[in-house]
Image (cartoon, rainbow, N blue to C red):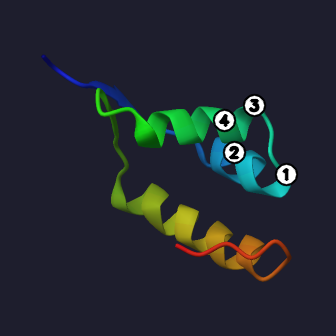
Amino acid sequence: MLKKRFLLDTNVFIAAFKSGYTKTTQLILKLLSDPDIELVVNSVLLEEYRSWLNKLSSRPPYIRE
């Protein structure tokens, strides 16, 4: 069976961590934990994720990659 593939926009990533535990956070956790789902990303978007991770992880609650 083919996995469902998703690409998350940076805004989804930011919303999941910036606003506390929300429906967006639940969505990301579901996507990460479902073995039938594969998250895809290109190198440009991955660097943008890393940039935001660094910005957001400097504020409580601390986030690790």
Q: Quadrant of residue 34?
A: top left
In what quadrant of the picture does the N terminus appear? top left
Residue occupied by mark 1? 20
* Residue 42 image position (x, y, % from top left): 35, 53
Q: Secondary structure at mark 1?
A: loop
Q: Earlier in the sequence, mark 2 or mark 4?
A: 2
Crowd rating for badge 4 (residues with CA inside 10 Å; few <14, some 14–19, many 20+): few
Q: Residue furthest top?
A: 1
Crowd rating for badge 2 (residues with CA inside 10 Å; few <14, some 14–19, many 20+): few
Q: Earlier in the sequence, mark 2 or mark 3?
A: 2
Residue occupied by mark 2? 11
Residue plotted at (48% across, 68% down): 47
* Residue 5 image position (x, y, % from top left): 32, 29
**What's the residue type where badge 1 is placed?**
Gly
Find out whether the residues at labels 2 and 4 contact each other: C-beta distance under 8 Å.
Answer: no
Find out whether the residues at labels 1 and 4 contact each other: C-beta distance under 8 Å.
Answer: no
Real-space Cα separation, disc 2 to disc 1, in angstroms: 14 Å
The residue closer to the viewer here, 20 or 52, is 20
Real-space Cα separation, disc 1 to disc 4, in angstroms: 11 Å
Find out whether the residues at labels 2 and 3 contact each other: C-beta distance under 8 Å.
Answer: no
Real-space Cα separation, disc 3 to disc 4, in angstroms: 5 Å
Find out whether the residues at labels 3 and 4 contact each other: C-beta distance under 8 Å.
Answer: yes
Relative to 8, residue 49 above or below: below
Q: Secondary structure at mark 4?
A: helix
Residue occupied by mark 3? 23
Q: Tag on residue 26? A: 4
**What's the residue type where badge 3 is placed?**
Lys
